[in-house]
Image (tube, rainbow, N blue to C red):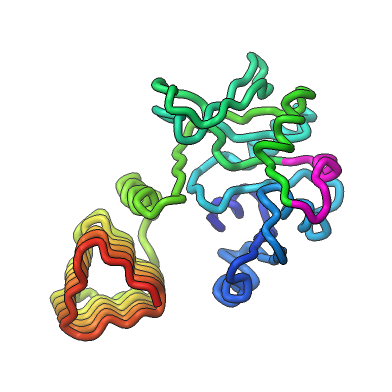
Amino acid sequence: MARWLGSGGVDQVVLAVNHLSDKLKIEVGQSIGGVRVVFSVEEAPLGTAGPIRLASDLLGKGDPFFVINGDIVSNIDLVGMLALHKSSEADATIALVSVPNPSQYGSVLTDSDGIVSKFDEKSGSFSSPGLVNAGVYVLSPRVMSSIPIGKSVSLEREVFPRLVENGKMQSWMHHGFWYDIGRVSEYVRTNKELLERQEAGSGESERDRQKVGHIVRPAYLGSKSRLGVGSEVGPFTILSDNVTVGDSATVQNSIVFEETTIGEKATIEDAVIGERVVIGRGSKIGRGSIIAGQSSIPARSVVPPDSVILC
């Protein structure tokens, strides 16, 4: 996401956080991919609009700004979207994307000029493709005055409907890829499809790692990943930065987060492995399993399918 934001001219990201904010500050640090990061901490949940008002002092004065849901992956043209927002003189611009079945999202209707005319709630009655909210917005600073200070306010149910009534909400049509990764199953599917698209590309470790393991495409190896003798990674596998795969270990159809160590002769298939996990020598991780960050799996363990292990 940081590379995408940077390509759109974004030089600072404000993360609105509440639960585990201290841990996030340590994990994220002060920059991501060259984009400066600052934090706005909610003492109590403020909905989807309240955090925007809370962070108002951290935003550029007088300039429009992006608001982006944290659970989407997309290549929305941020530069083009911002340009449309400015030229239309809208109070808000919303990115829309067409999906085969909008029932789980609710649909968005626009007029011939792209002005949003109506939001339809989620309904099981939708049976044909429709436009849905892509979770990316450009807001003008004047929207701030419509958000009460210190209260829980919904951007989608309270702020946007008023803008629609006044004809002040523009739409930006997105025709590239878009994924909602709010569920683990969708997160896994997204990563697999992006590998197929080759959007992920090849990490630095493709050039620098010891060429002793076997890679089955499509796969992605992050910077400083290390493969042991006789190991096999892929297909549809993502190793984040600084992952070590031991000799004769196998990792297939899986996502492995940074700084994780996979022991010799271990087998991982169709799993999500968190950061700084240690998978012991000879262990077998069952399909559909999720192992949270910093867990340690003893040597020769057998983790049953669909297990969830939390640290």
Residue 186 placed where, x, y %?
A: 38, 48
Residue 250 placed where, x, y %?
A: 17, 70
Name the residue: 24% across, 58% down.
253
Left or right: where 180 falls relative to 234: right
Name the residue: 44% across, 43% down.
179
Left or right: where 93 falls relative to 126: right
Residue 42 placed where, x, y %?
A: 71, 63
Q: Visible in this render: residue 161?
A: yes
The quadrant where residue 31 appears: bottom right
Residue 222 placed where, x, y %?
A: 38, 68
Q: Visible in this render: residue 205?
A: no
Left or right: where 232 falls relative to 167: left
Name the residue: 35% across, 78% down.
277
Q: Which residue is more in the foreground, 179 or 30?
A: 179
Compared to residue 178, the image places residue 284 above or below, namely below
Q: Does the magenta stretch include residue 140?
A: yes
Which residues, given as a range, are shown in magenta? 139-151
Compared to residue 247, the image places residue 10 above or below, namely above
Compared to residue 287, the image places residue 99 above or below, namely above
Name the residue: 56% across, 64% down.
33
Give the quarter of the figure containing the C terminus.
Answer: bottom left
The number of discs equals 0
Q: Does the magenta stretch include residue 154?
A: no
The quadrant where residue 234 appears: bottom left
The quadrant where residue 36 appears: bottom right
